[in-house]
Image (cartoon, helix red, strand yellow):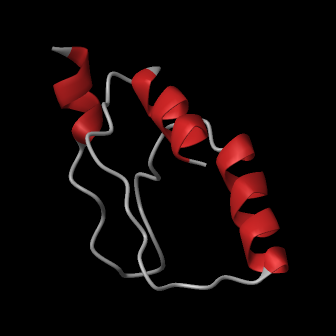
Amino acid sequence: MRANLAERLLAHNMAVDAFSIVGFSFSKIFMEANLKAIDKWNGILPQVTGGGAVPFIGVGEIRKR
């Protein structure tokens, strides 16, 4: 899981220095769902979440510089 995460983030110029989960136990279904979501993710955060919620700060402009 660490190697998969590090590889996917590196493609977007993000490095993983440490990855540690201690004392947690996840169900097999939960892990499969998360891995499926990671595989589907295109690396782009949503611009707005929910109705009436505060939108994310526009990081798209920062990326273009």
Name above or below for residue 21 compared with residue 18: below
Name above or below for residue 11 compared with residue 54: above
Q: Quadrant of residue 16?
A: top left
Q: Position of residue 64 (x, y in %)?
A: 24, 17
- State the residue lying farthest toward the front: 23
Q: Nearer the viewer, residue 23 or 49?
A: 23
Which residue corresponds to the image point at 33% horizontal and 22% vertical from the top-left?
Answer: 13
Which residue corresponds to the image point at 46% horizontal and 35% vertical from the top-left?
Answer: 6
Q: How many marks?
A: 0
Q: Nearer the viewer, residue 15 or 46?
A: 15
Name above or below for residue 50 compared with residue 33: below
Q: Position of residue 65 (x, y in %)?
A: 15, 14
Q: Quadrant of residue 60?
A: top left
Q: Quadrant of residue 32?
A: bottom right
- State the residue lying farthest toward the top: 65
Q: Position of residue 48 (x, y in %)?
A: 41, 61
Q: Position of residue 29 (x, y in %)?
A: 84, 77
Which residue corresponds to the image point at 72% horizontal and 55% vertical from the top-left?
Answer: 35
Left or right of 49: which side holds 26?
Answer: right
Name above or below for residue 51 compared with residue 56: below
Which residue corresponds to the image point at 76% horizontal and 84% vertical from the top-left?
Answer: 27
Q: Nearer the viewer, residue 55 or 3?
A: 3
